[in-house]
Image: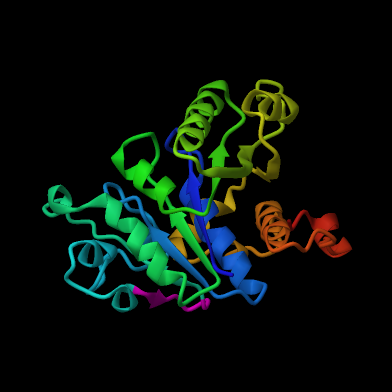
Amino acid sequence: MSRVITISSGKGGVGKTTTAINLGSALNQFGKNVVVVDANLTTPNVGLHLGAPIVPVSLNHVLLGKAKVSDAIYEHESGTKIIPSSLSVRELRQLQYEKLKDVSRRLKKMTDYIILDSAAGLGEEAVAAFEAADEIILVTNPEIPAVTDALKASKLAEQLGKEVKGVIVTRVRGEKSEMPIANIKDMLELPILGVVPEDRNVPKSVLMKNALIYTHPRSRASRAYRKLAAKIIGKNDYRERTPLFDIIFGRY
């Protein structure tokens, strides 16, 4: 059965788009048919990350009733499918965000997983992405402001009657100033689905216009995203070993 997963956060800059792209790509690596949708209509980034900043037909066209959802799907060279949003600001006032639910419903007939990269915050765009979801995954950093905003997002999902599957803690550096993972779990009262370390290769992957799991497959963050994808599809026994050669030379 197809699933719509909204990747959200209460705060911007926590790695939400990076997570949406790499989770979608990792699910694709596991043989799942995936579409990553840029539901952040005000400040879209999926197309920018994957080398498709301007496309003939975008999600905006679909929401405006000017195109079919199938016409807005583009296949990246990696095999992952995406639906970018337009960078134009002229049509934003005309968009009806609630139609995102209809888009998700139509996509469920075409694919296994729909990953919605939601707008940050708790505004109208974020609410639309929540309402279009079967389940929600929150992304946060190990910092009190980010976790506090994630808590607000969790409460919003609860008010909308939507399931929050859990939390992904990204950009973890292992420093004493960071909020401990156990404390994040207790504060949010949600399971921790994955912990993704800070990775200097992420901006490199953006420049290369591809997902990190393809540009730097042996990096720690890539391994974390593949482990997360395995958990989502029920491969709880999934284990990934780092080759000894990579450990010796620090290539991970």
Q: Residue furthest right?
A: 244
Q: Quadrant of the N terminus?
A: bottom right
Snapshot quadrant of residue 107: bottom left
- Name above or below for residue 233 compared with residue 140: below
Closer to the camera, 124 or 200? 124
How many marks the image carries: the answer is 0
Residue under the image location 30 percent in, 47 percent down: 43
Residue bounds of the magenta highlight: 73-79
Main secondary structure found in the magenta portion: loop
Which image quarter holds the C terminus? bottom right
- Lateral position of residue 88 relative to residue 160, left or right: left
The location of residue 61, given as percent across then percent down, is 21, 66
| Residue at 44% over, 38% down | 160
Residue 234 locus on image (x, y percent): 74, 62
Which residue of the protein is positioned furthest toward the front in this rendering? 161
* 78 in the magenta segment: yes
Q: Is residue 221 above or below residue 59?
A: above
Of 248 and 180, the residue lying toward us: 180
Which residue is more in the foreground, 30 or 215?
30
Q: Which image quadrant for residue 32?
A: bottom right
